[in-house]
Amino acid sequence: MGVLKKFEQRLEGLVNGTFAKVFKSEVQPVEIAGALQRECDNNATIWNRDRTVVPNDFIVELSTPDFERLSPYSGQLGDELAGMVRDYAKQQRYTFMGPIKVHLEKAEDLDTGLYRVRSRTLASSTNQQAPGAGAPAAPPAPAAGRPGGYGYPPAGAPAGAPPMPPSPPPGRGSAPYLQSAPAAPAAGVRMRYWVEINGARHQISRATLVMGRSTEADVRIDDPGVSRRHCEIRTGTPSTIQDLGSTNGIVVDGQHTTRATLRDGSRIVVGSTTIIYRQAEG
């Protein structure tokens, strides 16, 4: 079971309690969880063969209406999101420099339904790491007056380490947002690609696959919320999905976007239809 699905199930157990109002917000917790996963992927720093360090301190910026709805539950939501990040790090073999914390902040420049995630790597005296990862040697102490900060390299990063990329654009797809690319297959290995829609498998036999409500689409989706030519998958290293100017947009792994990198098992939502992207060797 995927990390995001487990996160959703934990939250479902709280829906009928004090946490219920969270789900009335324009921004859903699972969207934030997906954004935090991508923040880890996009800011991962390889220190050596056995250690990849990711941020451990996250700021989720919300519009004023969303912040007012979510802030009464920020402590509990922050704990749940931190647990999700910890589970995801274990799955990806990431490590941390310190305790994982997720904070909510209000951003006056964001409209309702939009959000933005920032992150930094904060070192602690006893480095915390993802469960199950090997115990790497402690990194060098940070230089005086150069703490890790939002948008800056981790405290104590090795000399010459590249800076972290800038924070992604607001959620809900105001600009293209690409996840870090999956590892390329070994030379000579042939890949198979397909999508699963309502239990049916559709092979991707060409470099591109157009999905939509039109009979001219490569895969026709009978859903009133889907545009005639809704989106296009391009296979490769990595495979990507591109919105084709649809009315309702696309959601990839919980993130509203116009373009995204696909991994095996990526969940794509168009209208009210969920599409599972698959790839495998052979």
Image (tube, rainbow, N blue to C red):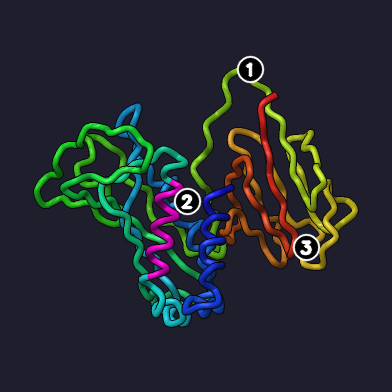
Residue 93 position, x and y percent, is: 41, 38
Q: Is residue 26 visible?
A: no
Magenta region, residue range: 76-88
**9 to 73, vertically: above or below:** above
**198 to 281, vertically: above or below:** below
Q: Residues within 10 Å of mark 2 (few under 14, many from 20)?
A: many
Judge left or right: residue 126 versus residue 175: left
The part of the image, by quadrant, that contains residue 139 is: top left
Q: Is residue 173 visible?
A: yes
The residue under the point 37% across, 59% down is: 118
Quarter of the picture holding the C terminus: top right
The residue under the point 45% across, 55% down is: 84
**66 to 185, vertically: above or below:** below
Seen as rendered, the residue at the extreme right is 215
Amino acid type at mark 1: Gly
Residue 163 position, x and y percent, is: 31, 44
- Residue carrying label 1: 188
Q: Residues within 10 Å of mark 3 (few under 14, many from 20)?
A: many
- Residue carrying label 3: 226
Q: Which of the two labelled residues, at mark 2 and mark 3, occupies the earlier sequence position?
A: 2
Residue 115 position, x and y percent, is: 47, 68
Q: Which of the two labelled residues, at mark 1 and mark 2, occupies the earlier sequence position?
A: 2
Asked if marks 1 and 2 touch (Cβ < 8 Å), the reply is no
- Residue carrying label 2: 38
Amino acid type at mark 3: Val
**243 to 42, vertically: above or below:** below
